[in-house]
Image (spheres, coloured by chain):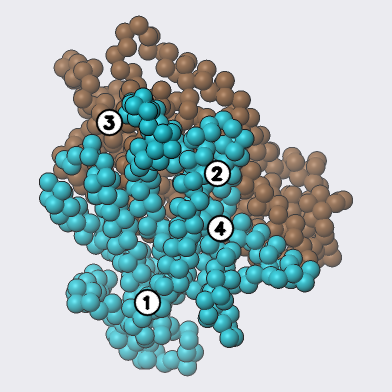
Amino acid sequence: MIHPGQGQAVEREQAAPPFEGDAQRPAQSYWNESWERLRANRMGIVAGSLIVVLAAIAIAAPLFTQFLTHFEPFRLDLDHTFQPPGQPHLLGTDELGRDTLTRLIYGGRVTLGVAFLTVALSLSLGTTVGLVAGYYGRWVDDLLMRFVDVVLAFPAIFLFILMSILFRPTPITLAAIIASVGWGGVARLVRGEVLSVKQRDFILATRSIGARDVRLIVRHLLPNVLPVLIVAASLGVGQIILIEAALDFLGLGIQPPTASWGNMLTNSESYFFHSTWLVYFPGITIFVTVLAANLFGNAVRDAFDPRLK
Amino acid sequence: MLAKYVVRRFLASIVVVLGVTLITLVLMDRTRGTYVPGIDLNPALRPEDIARLRTNLGLDQPFYMWYLTWIWNVLHGDFGRSMIDGSPVMSHILERLPNTLELTGTAIVIGILLSIPLGIVGALRRGSKADHALTVVSVAGFAVPQFWMGLLLILVFSVTFEQHGLPWLPSSGATSPLNGGDILDRIVHLIMPATVLAFFYLSVWSRFTRSSMLEVLSQDYIRTARAKGMSERRVVYLHGLRNALIPLITLVGLELPGLVSGGLVVEVVFGWPGIGRLAFERALQYDYSTVMGVTFFATLLVVAGNLLADVLYAVLDPRIRFA
């Protein structure tokens, strides 16, 4: 049996599934083991800590601007446009005299917030659809999965363009827009897991003692697809930040004057001749953040993905 | 068995194409409001002119009637005329498509040609300096925003080089506006955008080749080949590489849809007159017929890419069977 897009998963198809009746091991040990593996991955821990630090800075943005940069993200200062990095503007100012570092810190709120919200939205929708389709099978499965096919075949960029005209992009609607494409992959992934877990004896046993569908799905199937979800979530953050930054750059995402790492670069081509820092800093911030998110995601996959053992 | 599978997938593909175009139209119809495409090109229009325009463009009908008409026409090979400039949608697509294919095609070819050897080196000298360097490059390529990389290239190779009197690369367009269009001119324009795209493909595919190669080289039949005294070169290239490349084919096949929409950001940064930018600009103007035409082709590519990847995969790997 093959599905479109299965190719990427092929390299790890023979490994053992999770929780396969391994009598010697207590049920707890999978999580402990994975956690130990993650902790032993120094690169992954450093990357993960960086993400936590960036998120903390974003959350505490007013504190940082109060005590470190001393500027407001929206305050124009037309006497000090295009100030090079130095004092008092540590990373310089833009065409309206706004402090770059302050805007980067506030932009982090938007960018990281959108990224985490997007992951949460696409995971919850994708998981629900995947669980229902995989569990009920038959026409429910056919119907839902054909819909997923349509979503995944959509040239995503057109969907983004049209949706961002339809819903004026705020951080929340932007997350919903990006998630409206992202959930399809999650649904496919979860459905695949459910199809294999469903066949196990413990499901039959649970059903035979009279468990209802909802209980079976929530208490027995969901915990078994959790490892796959954790991996998908941690690998997704970096990609979503890149998509969001690109949409902001194209003018389809967060609208000025609200700062986001992507829209700070929108007009930067005009400043090439005199103010290159306006091109460097937002890009470096995106790059480092995505890098850290990806490295952490890889570490999580290596630690948690049961198929990699 | 294969034929039956292909037919079934083909039928499913029709549903997908219909679904995608329908959703596109509904979204456009919801967002348009009472705006009539092209209306702001002529400020002297009277209300009765606008009403006539609406009738001519078919916008006085509900969207499903418009959709049915559109499908009927597409089945007869007619993609209609642009609502903005009145020229056939097909001619717009045919004008822009070669540029996009030139850009993404070059990037894909460069990506394949570089990533396979690099992936092999990484796998054969696992843990060496070369392998680590490759890992760094590939991790970076996966994390760098394409538009930012494009901006940096323009900053260095167009702006800074020109300021220092060095030979610089053009930052925008597919050809020079004056006296342009010969092969050398096109190549010069192609260098930077193709580099950005190829860098991304390179980072994904070299990683993939490496892990696929490592997995294949640990198989029993490789040990058998070595045991019977076959030269290392034959083992690696004849038995190893051939099997390691099978999954890569799927991956490249899945990249086909990127031919149209994936290059959009790069097309915007480098002012490349490609099909992604056409759709981007026309969607902002509610040019129904052009957007529908491009969406149709883009979706066709997605579906064809998926199907091709699956079928090729099954043909190349006899272990896969169709159900």
Chain B shown in which color?
cyan
Residue placed at 56% from the left, 48% from the top? B141
SS label for mark 2: helix
Residue B8 appears in the picture as rendered: no
Instruction: Name the residue carrying label 3.
Output: A194
Residue at position x 28%, y 58% in the image:
B304
Identify the amino acid type marked 2: Ser
Q: Residue B94 carries which label?
A: 1
Numbered mark located on residue B196 in the image: 4
Quarter location, residue A190:
top left
CA separation, marks 4 and 1?
Answer: 24 Å
Type of amino acid at the residue the image marks with label 1: Leu
Estimate the spatial distance between the alpha carbons at disc 4 and disc 3, rounded to whole Å: 39 Å
Which residue is the site of mark 2? B138
Contact, mark 1 vs mark 2 (Cβ under 8 Å): no
Decide: marks 3, 2 in contact (CB < 8 A)?
Answer: no
Chain under callout 3: A
Of all chains, the one bearing label 1 is B
* Secondary structure of the residue carrying numbered label 3: helix
Of badges 4 and 3, the one in the foreground is 4
Disc 3 residue type (three-letter):
Val
